[in-house]
Amino acid sequence: MNQRILFLIIYCFTKNSDAKAITETSDEKDKVGFQYYPEIGWVHHHPMPLDWEEARLRCYYEDAELMSPENEEMLKVMSKIGKTAPIWTGVSATYSKGDFFTITGLPLTEIPINWAKDEPDNHNNNEDCLVMLPGGNMADCSCDETYAFSCYKPNNFKTPTCGSVTGYEMDHRTKSCYKFHSTPEIWSTAFMICAAEGAHLAVIDSPGEQDLLRDLYLKKRTNSDPGFVTLGFRDWKNHKLWMTVTGKNINNLPGVWAKNEPNNLGGKENCGNLSKDGGLNDGTCDYPLPFICEIENK
Ligand SMILES: [Ca+2]
Ligand SMILES: [Ca+2]
Ligand SMILES: [Ca+2]
């Protein structure tokens, strides 16, 4: 094995110039150490070697994936990061022997792989994980070996941020930031205040978000309020077409109406809110209610 590594190192140092120059990273770096690469997205490099499974888990907990050369751009970035020492890729055959896939499920045939000389060799029939050697070529090796690694989030990942207005707190379940406004306002004023804060009235986009908003409301509400908090949906021109302020039909979203709602009490309930009991309700737009604003991080 030592001989093998020595060979690989010698091999790699003679083959070290393939990767074309990549754009330097911007200075943008988020709080947990992800560096932004304009061509591909966010990369957090971990120089401390771990075995493959630990590396995979670490990236998972960072809401990222153990990075693989999924395309030429990612290959270039990884080659640069791993210029002097081998780094893990996310490519492994841990589910079935010999079937190598990236963490995201891409087979070897769909990613740019250049094998190092005499690789892959499945040495001792125990090499189910792929490592990138200095120079960018790949070798299979035992998943129990330890190497540096990088965690990756694609370009559409945006650093979670709650903007510059105070009072917003991020919830890690949705990555959105929410602010509860306890001063009751009519629906249109609430809409305006959220907009002024770079937010929108909160919208239930995922199954857990309704409970999250109810919990936030129950935690912050005062007992004198009427038991409803304004959210970002309303009846479109009185035609019983309930649309969110983000342009979605709420029939296509996971929000759940309270029992016997919407009941259009008095024929003038065209604005959406959430009852303290957790269900959606239609209410009068001109009745002032507390409200919740949301800044999405998608
Ligand atoms: Ca090998
Ligand atoms: Ca939302
Ligand atoms: Ca109602």
Image (cartoon, helix red, strand yellow):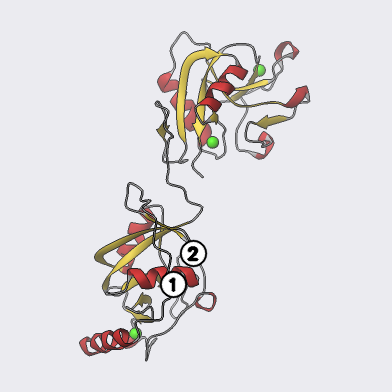
Q: Where 215 sits versus 154, above or below?
A: above
Q: Amino acid at mark 1?
A: Leu
Label 2 SS: loop
* Distance in Å between CA atoms under marks 2 and 1: 16 Å
- Residue bearing the label numbered 2: 104
Residue 224's disc number = none
Residue lying furthest top in this view? 224
Marker count (numbered): 2
Q: Position of residue 117 (x, y in %)?
A: 37, 90
Pick whichever of labels 2 and 1 is earlier in the sequence.
1
Q: Residue at x 47, y 8 (%)?
A: 224
Q: Is residue 105 visible?
A: yes
Q: Amino acid at mark 2?
A: Thr
Dividing the picture into quadrants, the one containing residue 284 is top right
Foreground pick, 65 / 197: 197
Mark 1 neighbour class, 10 Å CA radius: few under 14, some 14 to 19, many 20 or more: many
Foreground pick, 155 / 88: 155
Label 1 SS: helix
Residue lying furthest right in this view? 239
Q: Residue at x 44, y 10 (%)?
A: 223
Instruction: Locate residue 239 relative to residue 25 in the image: left or right.
Output: right
Q: Position of residue 169 (x, y in %)?
A: 40, 32
Q: Where 18 sits versus 31, above or below?
A: below
Dividing the picture into quadrants, the one containing residue 218 is top left
Foreground pick, 81 / 101: 81
Q: Where 157 sits versus 79, above or below?
A: above
Instruction: Name the front one of labels 2 and 1.
Output: 1
- Residue bearing the label numbered 1: 75
Foreground pick, 43 / 67: 43
Q: Where 271 sits versus 13, above or below?
A: above
